Image (tube, helix red, strand yellow):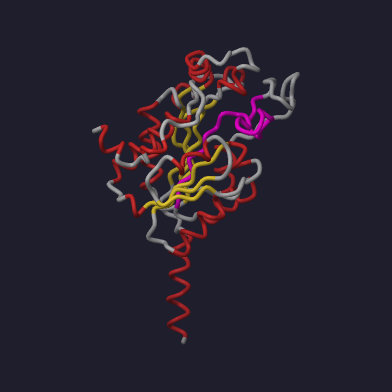
Amino acid sequence: MKTEAVRALLRMDKLPTIWCPGCGHGTILSSLLRAVVKTGWKKDEIALISGIGCGGRVPGYVDFNTLHTTHGRALSFATGIKLAKPEMKVIVVSGDGDSVGIGGNHFVHACRRNIDMTIVIFNNGIYGMTGGQVSPTTPSGYRASTAPYGQLEKPFDIVNLALGSGATYVARGSVYHVPMLDKLIYDGFMHKGFSVIDVITTCPTTFGRRNKLTDDGVKNLEWVKGIVVSAGAAKKMTPEELEGKYVMGVFRKDDTKKDLNTLYDEIEQKARRKQ
């Protein structure tokens, strides 16, 4: 893929990014842009929405129709856009705290409604921008500013949450496995229905330093490599071996369920026939 095609989707005057050295967010953004190029979508067809957080800076860097909204409310704004302008290609980028913490209720109902959009979750297991607090996905035993002796609570599994809430495309990748991540995001874009891509990524500054990974980006990336396993490998592992691991792959791809806009169109046509 030509670099020029990806660069054409960026607001070059807004670069460099504010992300810390070694942060995985730039890797996710690159995968997202390559997936967009592959779709053939035009920039004016795309609406990209974020909430607050490190991942929330993405709308400032991409040359689409963009919204940088309030904390946890990205899916609410995105739902409004998709219902008002169903022809738009709607993408949401959100951190783990933004999506399933502060925005958890919106996430559950977006999955349930099966509205035709894609959410890419930058899952670094921490509230990175706001001070390094525990997030809903902070792994058990790991430190945060609000858990100096280790996180006691069982973290959310975003994949299981999405599956249980009814999302029709659910996948997980990592910033270490970039070609796979490119494909997962592209497939999510192409799916007609609510698509969730959980991306295991790094936060060298507020997660890595507290958890003896230092702020070295390579060491943090190696940590990601060690905690993710493919779906094929996971089948051969015991529950004990899978403890603390994240399984990657596609967990659901259901093309049989109608998306919300289609259901609304059917209701509208039915109502018109009765007039």
Taking depth in this image into account, of 268 and 58 the one nearest to the observer is 58
Q: Position of residue 45 (x, y in %)?
A: 35, 54
Q: Is residue 151 above or below residue 14?
A: above
Left or right: 67 with respect to 42? right
Q: Is residue 121 above or below residue 69?
A: above
Please count the marks in the image: 0
Q: Position of residue 15 (x, y in %)?
A: 41, 34
Residue 150 belongs to the span the image colors magenta: no
- Residues in magenta, as a range: 117-139
Left or right: 252 with respect to 38? right
Q: Is residue 230 above or below residue 59?
A: above
Q: Is residue 11 above or below residue 255?
A: above
Give the residue at x 52% y 14%: 216
Q: Position of residue 42 (x, y in %)?
A: 30, 51
Residue 134 belongs to the span the image colors magenta: yes
Residue found at the far front of this picture:
13
Q: Position of residue 24 (x, y in %)?
A: 48, 26
Taking depth in this image into account, of 30 and 167 the one nearest to the observer is 30
Taking depth in this image into account, of 134 and 237 the one nearest to the observer is 134
* Majority SS type along the magenta span: loop
Give the residue at x 66% y 28%: 132
Q: Quadrant of the N terminus?
A: top left
Give the residue at x 55% y 20%: 204
